[in-house]
Amino acid sequence: MGHGWEGAVLKLLRAKDFTFTVTGATQITEHYRRLEFTDGGLLAELGVHPTMWVRLWFDNQGKPHQRGYTLVDPDREAGTFAIEFALHNGIASDWSQKAQPGDTVQATVYGTGFAPLDPEPERLLIVGDAASLPAVNSLLDAFPDTPATVWFETSSDDELPHRTTAHHDLRLVPRDGDALADRVRAELPALAADPARSYCWIACEAKATRALTAFARKEIGFPKDRMHAMAYWRE
C-alpha cells in the first residue's frame, strides 16, 4: 500500500520511512493497549529526544490512513520502543487490538524534534491531556529533578499512569468546555515571573492549544525558544 498524496508531500519534505515490527502486546487497562516494537533502524539513525513521535500508516479499505503516536520508553541501543493506543472505534485502534508479534507497520518521521534547552529550565510548565500523556511523561522522565507544574485535563476513561514524582505538581482539571484554558490562564502568570528561566509545553485540543499559546506568548512573554505548542487532537 502506498501512502497517497500525504506520503508524497512528506517525501518531498525529506521525511524518513521505516518499518516497525511488533514484538509484544499488553492490555494496560480496559481502554489502552501497549504494543512493543523493534524500530527498523529509526533510533540508531535519528537518536532519541523527549516527546518524540512518528506517523503510522494503516489501510482504510485500500486507502492510506495515518495517525501520530509518541514513542514510549525508546531504547536506542536495543532499537526498541512501545506505543500506547487508546481503544475506541477507529482504524488505528482496531489494528492495535489485532496486532500480534511479527506483524509490521509502516512509519514516517517528520515534524518531531526537541531543541536542547540552554540554560536548562528552573521549572517546567506543562499543559496536556490523555492524548498527549505519553509525551508529558517523556518530558518528566527527561528532567527528573526539575520542578514541574502539570495542568492535565481529565475524563472518566483516562487510565494511563502519570510519571510524576515529588518534584511535580499535578493539577487535574475535569474536561468541561474551556475549564482547562481558564485555569491555566488564571494560574500560569504566578509561576512564570521570568519566562526565560522556565519552559512551557502545551499539547491538548486544538482550540485550547491556540488560546493558551497566544496567552503564553503575548500576555506572559515566553520567548519562542522557551516554549512549544502543538494541537494533539481536534473536536
Image: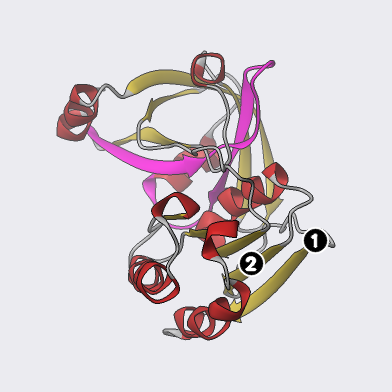
Along the polypeptide, which appears first: circle 1 or circle 2?
A: 2
Query: What's the residue type where badge 2 is placed?
Result: Val
Residue at 58% x, 40% y is 50
Tell me the residue that label 1 is attached to.
Answer: 167
Q: Quadrant of residue 158?
A: bottom right
Callouts 1 and 2 close, C-beta under 8 Å:
no
Classify mark 2: helix, strand or loop: strand
- Residue 150, disc: 2
Between disc 1 and disc 2, the foreground one is: 1
| Secondary element at tag 1 | loop
- Expressed as whole percent of the image width and height from the top left, the position of residue 94 reads 45, 45
Examine the rendered structure and indicate whether residue 118 appears above or below residue 38.
below
Q: Which residue is rendered at x = 54% and y = 32% of the image?
A: 99
Highlighted range, magenta: 62-91
Q: Position of residue 73 (x, y in %)?
A: 67, 35
Quadrant where the C terminus sits is bottom left
Vertical position of residue 120 compared to residue 151: above or below: above
Identity of the residue drawn at 63% across and 53% down: 121
Q: Which mark is residue 126?
A: none
Q: Is residue 174 visible?
A: no
